[in-house]
Amino acid sequence: MKLFDVYPLFDVNIVRGKGCHVWDDKGTEYLDLYGGHAVISIGHAHPHYVEALSKQVATLGFYSNSVINKLQQEVADRMGELCGYDDYQLFLINSGAEANENALKLASFHNQRTRVVSFAKAFHGRTSLAVEVTDNPKIIAPVNANNHVTYLPLNDTEAMKAELGKGDVCAVIIEGIQGVGGIQLPTTEFMQALRQECDKTGTVLILDEIQSGYGRSGKFFAHQYNGIRPDMITMAKGIANGFPMGGVLISPKFTPVYGQLGTTFGGNHLACAAAIAVLDVMKSEHLVENAATVGAHLLEELTHFKQIKEVRGRGLMIGMEFEEPVKEIRKRLLFEQKVFTGVSGTNVIRLLPPLCLSQAEADEFLERLHRVLC
């Protein structure tokens, strides 16, 4: 049987990692500025993380409700302390797409509406909400028609107010920072107006922090720069440092009902052990603060490259937009300078390094980028 070939792969076979560095099967060392789509939050093979997972595998090989409930509550307690939402409720699942689908489902139960508002170039998962962000004419927006999704321009307050004013919108879902859409930031003015309009019209506000959350922006969640509190926050990516896990933070305004939401593998013992270890390391090593400091340094230094049209982002979620397609620049960074990066669309290189990236490592990347561009 063949694999369903939808992922283009570079001819690099990574076999080992440590911190922000990885090694291939030939012993070549690479600087990782992408972290597997932002999933590597605390660095590759962090010893505390490895120990926590190994211990859980060795001591628990069966499904125990009492043990898993205890682990899930420990995740909730530690997460609430670090993120500033200790009065919210936590529902654990397996991925970002599953987080968004459960959030939309809960929103519809809450107000008995079905129409959803999202924004141009948004990406909210493979199974519910996505828009075309590539130049491939074979890829169309795989939107579930049952969601009745309306897409608006990002940061267009008047268009948003007009749409929500119709009174039939179930939920607005918006990213703290658009990732796949090219590292686009909603403005504080827009986010505060959105919060007010959602309150006015009985619309549920969902913040998709799957890529922009978990310390990546220099705050625990990117929307915390905007001074708002959403009704739900969806998470995944860095929550368990590469182990499959997702979650929804749910406002106290929602009352849980048995059977309302469900998941088969969500919040299993291994995922919880991984998530607890990540929170331990984030707290003890001050990784959110590090993302803010090192990210600000990178953002400032990147503005000095005349070849870059625009630099956007916050913390360690950065987009470098060029006038021309970035395919060759990215290949040269990888094969000549041994640096992993990502892309958004055709003209944007995306940086999503582990949150432990040091300033010295950031400077090393800047030097290698200089060799490619200059």
Image: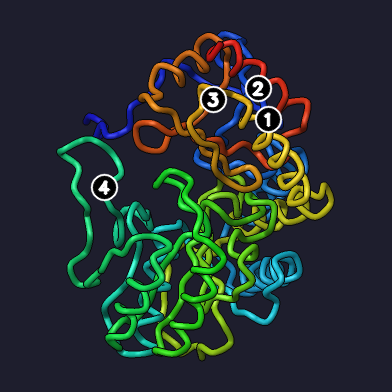
**Residue for badge 3:** 340
Count of numbered circles in the view = 4
Q: Nearer the viewer, residue 312 or 277?
A: 312
Mark 3 closeness class: few <14, some 14–19, many ≥20 residues within 10 Å: many
Work out whether residue 262 or residue 210 is closer to the camera in this orientation and state it. Answer: 210
Which of pointers 4 and 2 indicates the residue nearer the eye?
Answer: 2
Mark 3 to mark 1 CA distance (whole Å) = 19 Å
Q: Point out the image quarter for the N terminus.
A: top left
Indicate left or right for 327 with 223 as reference. Answer: left
> Which of the 4 image quarters holds residue 223?
bottom right
Image spot of residue 315 (x, y percent)? 66, 46
Q: Residues within 10 Å of mark 4 (few under 14, many from 20)?
A: some
Q: Is residue 56 found left or right of 92 in the rendered image?
A: right
Q: Are marks 3 and 2 in contact (CB under 8 Å)?
A: no
From the image, which quarter does the C terminus lie in?
Answer: top right
Tag 1 residue: 301
